[in-house]
Amino acid sequence: MIDFHSHFLPRMDDGSSSVEESLEMLRSSLEQGVEVMAATPHFYAFREDPDSFLERRAAAFAKLPLADAPHPKLLLGAEVYYFDGMSHSESLRRLTLEGTRYILIEMPFSRWSEHMVDEVLRLRDRLRLKPYLAHIERYLHAQRGTGYIDRFLQEGMLIQCNAEFFLTRSTVRKALKMLRNGQIHILGSDAHNMAERAPELGNAVSLIRSELGDRVLEDLDANGRAMLQSVLAGGNVQ
Ligand SMILES: [Fe+2]
């Protein structure tokens, strides 16, 4: 299984607060069956430029003593928060998931506008990027009745959801329904720490398996592997 969204880099954002915590997150993920894990620290264009972000990310990554610690294969990326004009921002090409054109986009939690949805979709034509939408479950309420999420789906945008969507009693039915209907394409832990936002993709996968069977998981896995095809084939993953 592939974790497409996590915050395990030490002291990079509001995720892991220490090298020790990062290593615990990695070990826990590996034990849960995560084979590849993407580091997607928050990137806010209004706060930081990509150069500084990439420097900090490299420094945080370098702090991890990976040679001595059990961990899944790791990929570096970013969780890019929406900003106006992003479809003209050439520098976003540097924030894709390592070795791919996929870029994780976080949208505002308030109601979107037509323009915002257009901006994200234009990333594909203008910058040749392949945006994938972070934690779909967080937007459902505010976008109800707007048709924006349907539009993303119709446009073939890839949709990620968090393990938590399946592991929360009040949302599990909705999560399974969306997965069955092909409205969720890849999973992420969105793990931030080893406390209240710990990695729990393994539990979500177990639940999906018992509720919907192996086939659905095979499809999710195939989606993820297709996205990472060039990277995994190259064998140059950490
Ligand atoms: Fe996140």
Image (spheres, helix red, strand yellow):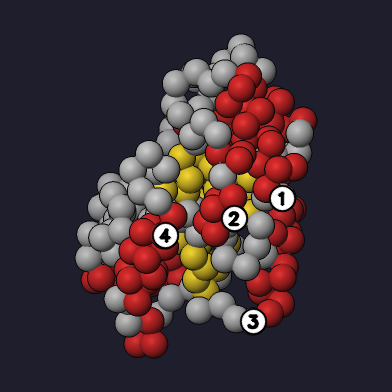
Of label 1 and label 4, which has the lower sequence position?
4
Which element carries disc 3, helix, strand or loop? Answer: loop
Q: Residue 41: x, y in percent?
A: 40, 54
Three-letter code for the amino acid on which mark 1 is drawn:
Arg
Q: Is residue 158 visible?
A: no
Of label 2 and label 1, which has the lower sequence position?
2
Q: Residue 138: x, y in percent?
A: 47, 31
Q: Which mark is residue 93?
A: 2
Of label 4 and label 2, which has the lower sequence position?
4
Q: Mark 3 CB in 8 Å range of ligand 1?
A: no
The residue under the point 50% across, 36% down is: 82
Three-letter code for the amino acid on which mark 3 is drawn:
Gly
Q: Nearer the viewer, mark 1 or mark 4?
A: 4
The residue under the point 33% across, 71% down is: 59
Q: How many neighbours does mark 3 have within 10 angstroms: few (below 14), some (14-19), or many (20 or more)?
A: few
Which element carries disc 2, helix, strand or loop? Answer: helix
